[in-house]
Amino acid sequence: MQKQSPVVPVFLAVAAGMFAYAPFLIDAAPYESTMGLIQRIFYYHVPSAMVMFGSAFVCGIASAVYLAKRSPQSDAVALAAAELVVVFGLIVLVTGPLWARKAWGVWWQWDARLTSSLVLWLIFVSYLMLRRFAGAGSEMLAAAVGVFGMANVPCVYWSVNVWRTIHPNTNVVRSLAPEMRLPFYWCVAAFVCLYVGLLLTRLRLEQSRRGLEAAYAEIED
Amino acid sequence: MNVSRFQIAACRWTTILAVLVAVVFVAAAAAQTQPPLAAIDGFVPMSSAVPREVLPATPLVFYAYSFVWLALIGYVFSIWRRMARVEQDLADVQRRLKDGQGGR
């Protein structure tokens, strides 16, 4: 049985504490002049997207290491990270339209950022489906999908600057007013702590599952 | 994991993912085909209309934050359930292995 890493409860406790205090900071931040209250979704939407991008990179790098060295540990990291891309991607894809409905008047627009984000999410859904249903040997194919998914991240990130789109561009975060900066980076830190805690927990689950498979194999022998 | 349990899990995950993808696409398609909110039965002069917010932001913000928490709690619950199941199976298998070694 795998032992839980002692840092996991620390990360999860820090994240819980930060999330508990976040509403007070968000409430104290000023309203955006054209969007008003609905802009508050930004404080969870953008950190979720950042974590989704980061997790795609973790999955892609771990997949590349797996392709190069066939290390089971990196395969487990890639699988755990891919699952978290799907979870945080779902948050981004649901909170975004709720914001858009008020800010743009529509739930969804097939513009570059929204469409490429949906495609990124679907790539990692397909990664998980491959791992789940493609049977033995699917690790290699899934690793290639993971690398491809990581390569898609810069396209999603820069899409708002390269193509004409109604989505805010990448300068928004850099040019945030100081009163908005603290709650935003607070939420980013909270999401990152939560992500690390969840990644390590999911990794432990994967290692236990592999231990179980090894034990079954030992029984059959 | 035996074959029947794997098949049940496979069916469950296929259904969940298929529903999820279908919901995303149907919602996006529905959003694109929404009719404009123009007056159909008659026009109201602007001077007599009570100024109000057409689409209040509060419920949308509430739904967004609620969804984030529901998704994260749901994911933590799913990890916890899977972990409990795997660890229980692992304990059973280790017990069987120990019994087998004792009988030799």
Image (spheres, helix red, strand yellow):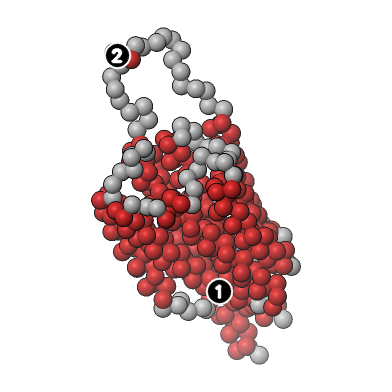
Which of the image's four quarters has the C terminus of chain A?
Answer: bottom right
For label 1, the crowd category at 10 Å Cα-Cα, with few meaning under 14, some 14 to 19 and many 20 or more, is many
Residue at 44% across, 15% down: B39
Query: Regarding mark 1 in the picture, which secondary structure is present there?
Result: helix
Residue at 70% across, 64% down: A144
Q: Please name the amino acid that badge 2 sits on.
A: Ser
Q: Nearer the viewer, residue A123 or B20?
A: A123
Residue A60 position (above or below residue A114): below
Whether residue A22 appears in this view of the structure is: yes
Q: Position of residue A107 (x, y in %)?
A: 49, 36
Q: CA distance from mark 1 to mark 2?
A: 69 Å
Name the quadrant containing residue B100: bottom right
Q: Position of residue A176 (x, y in %)?
A: 37, 52
Q: Chain of mark 1?
A: A
Residue designated by label 1: A208
Q: Please name the amino acid that badge 1 sits on.
A: Ser
Residue designated by label 2: B47
Residue at 57% across, 41% down: A164
